[in-house]
Amino acid sequence: MTTAASYYVYILKCRTGHLYTGYTNNVKRRLSEHRKGTASKFTRSRLPVTLMYQERLRSRAEAMRREIEVKKMSRASKLRLCRPIAKQAKH
């Protein structure tokens, strides 16, 4: 029996304060790529980046839809999404 793959939507905070939203099936690998400057042109010039939020979804299609929803959100709404992880990091 095979296990269904999980996909994630994530938000990174760049050195400049910009927020970057993406999706992946491996957050650890993708974060490593961003930090090396090989994941996207946007984050490459704004290093370092910090993972602020991740959300697990059941399929690639769901992750892609959710990524679009998050990208359409205001900065304030995206920061509200990030609060739960930010609070956990302080403990």
Image (cartoon, rainbow, N blue to C red):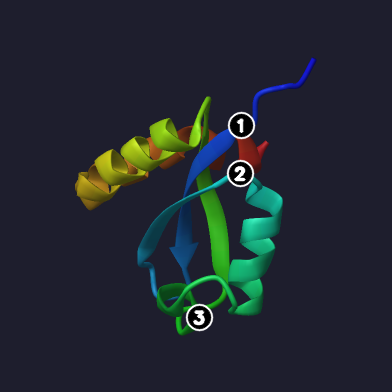
| Image quadrant occupied by the C terminus | top right
Looking at the image, do the residues carrying marks 1 and 3 touch, with CB atoms under 8 Å apart?
Answer: no
What is the number of callouts on the image? 3
Residue occupying the point 38% across, 42% down:
64
* Image coordinates for residue 58, horizontal then vertical, percent: 53, 25
User: What is the CA distance from the residue labelled 3 to the residue labelled 2?
Assistant: 20 Å
Determine crowd level at label 2: few under 14, some 14-19, many 20+ residues with C-alpha closer than 10 A.
Answer: some
Identify the residue at the far front of this view: 1
Quick one: label 1, few (<14), some, or many (20+) residues within 10 Å? some
What's the residue type where badge 3 is placed?
Arg
Could you say where residue 60 lies in the image, as x and y percent from the top left? 48, 37
- Relative vertical location of residue 72 with respect to residue 2 in this rendering, above or below: below
Q: Mark 1 sits on what residue?
A: 6
For this orientation, the residue located farthest to the right is 1
Compare marks 1 and 3 and give the one earlier in the sequence.
Answer: 1
The answer to whether residue 27 is left or right of residue 65 is right
Along the horizontal axis of the image, is 77 left or right of 41? left
Question: Does residue 53 sit above or below 6 in this rendering?
Answer: below
Q: Quadrant of the N terminus?
A: top right
Give the residue number, with chain letter if any, for mark 2: 25
Identify the amino acid type marked 2. Answer: Asn
Q: Secondary structure at mark 3?
A: helix
SS state under label 2: loop
Q: Residue at x 53, y 78 (%)?
A: 47
Residue 77: horizontal and vertical position, in percent? Answer: 26, 40
